[in-house]
């Protein structure tokens, strides 16, 4: 039961932080959270320590604080995600991947094309995350996979962090089309075992998110992800 409570507290608190319900700068104390959530302090304390390790909280003498990020932190996190994903696809290219795995990636690309054509952003988000996970899994490196997944937990660093917030449909559709071309080139590089090219393409692909962040900030969009970011 204690382990179940710890996982439940972790998921709930992580969701509240990532959704912006707990805004950057909010003080968190295990005693208060325990009373609010109706569980003992131990699972709350364990969840807070885990979230600190994920980079979402900062610990001080009085407890924990939801971390605030400067825009430079956002871009650094995006670039770090690109480097980690790049390392994963480079390793996949070096190892070589099966025809079946390449066929699965191409099937996902076709589904992404259909989502773009239909303007189904929610479907695109889901398929895009799945595509990235498929690519990373091809590295067959448990450490790389775990570190990539950890980078995704930052609210603005994942592969589909901001798309549902955009109101400029034409610009956003153009961004998706560019991203799809990146996807195809990355699959091509992995297929042909061009490891250096795969790495460079994945790093460049991640940097598309820089533009998404700039647009969201310039438009003063009330994206939940930006609740943790100092936009002054």
Image: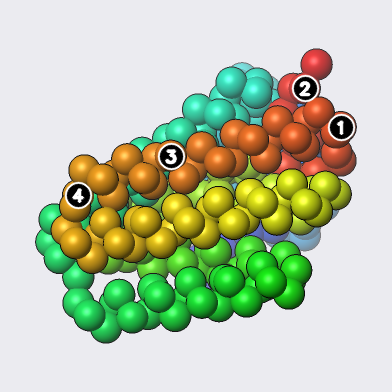
Q: Give the mark nearer the N terminus: 3 vs 4.
A: 4
Q: Tell how many labels.
A: 4
Looking at marks 3 and 2 on the same chain, the residue that comes earlier in the sequence is marked by 3
Q: Nearer the viewer, mark 3 or mark 2?
A: 3
As drawn, 8 above or below 45: below
Mark pair 1, 2: CA separation? 9 Å
Q: Quickly name the residue at label 2.
A: 231
Whether label 1 touches label 3, CB < 8 Å: no
Residues 65 and 73: in front is 73
Q: Mark 4 highlights which residue?
A: 195
Give the secondary structure at mark 4.
helix
Cα distance in 3D space between marks 1 and 4: 39 Å
| Horizontal relation, residue 41 to residue 224: left or right | left
The first of marks 1 and 4 along the sequence is 4
**Residue under pointer 3:** 204
The residue labelled by disc 1 is 220
User: Residue, x 62% and y 55% (percent of image)?
Assistant: 176
- In this rendering, the label closer to the viewer, 1 or 2: 1
Mark in the foreground, 4 or 2: 4
Looking at the image, tell me whether mark 1 or mark 2 is earlier in sequence order. Answer: 1
- Please tell me which of labels 1 and 3 falls first in the chain: 3
Q: Is residue 21 visible?
A: no
């Amino acid at each position: 039961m204690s382990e179940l409570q710890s996982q439940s507290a972790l998921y709930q608190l992580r969701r509240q932080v990532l959704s912006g319900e707990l805004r950057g700068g909010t003080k968190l104390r295990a005693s208060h959270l325990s009373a609010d959530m109706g569980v003992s302090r131990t699972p709350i304390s364990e969840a807070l320590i885990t979230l600190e390790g994920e980079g979402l909280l900062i610990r001080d003498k009085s407890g924990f604080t939801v971390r605030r990020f400067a825009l430079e932190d956002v871009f650094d996190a995006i670039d770090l995600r690109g480097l980690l994903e790049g390392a994963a696809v480079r390793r996949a290219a070096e190892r070589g991947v099966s025809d079946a795995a390449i066929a699965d990636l191409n099937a996902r690309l076709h589904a992404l094309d259909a989502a773009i054509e239909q303007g189904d952003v929610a479907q695109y988000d889901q398929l895009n995350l799945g595509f990235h996970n498929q690519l990373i899994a091809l590295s067959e490196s448990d450490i790389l996979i775990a570190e990539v997944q950890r980078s995704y937990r930052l609210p603005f660093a994942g592969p589909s962090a901001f798309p549902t917030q955009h109101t400029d449909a034409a610009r956003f559709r153009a961004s998706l089309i560019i991203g799809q071309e990146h996807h195809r080139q990355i699959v091509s590089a992995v297929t042909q075992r061009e490891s250096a090219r795969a790495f460079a393409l994945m790093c460049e692909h991640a940097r598309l998110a820089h533009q998404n962040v700039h647009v969201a900030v310039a438009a003063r969009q009330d994206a939940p992800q930006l609740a943790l970011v100092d936009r002054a």
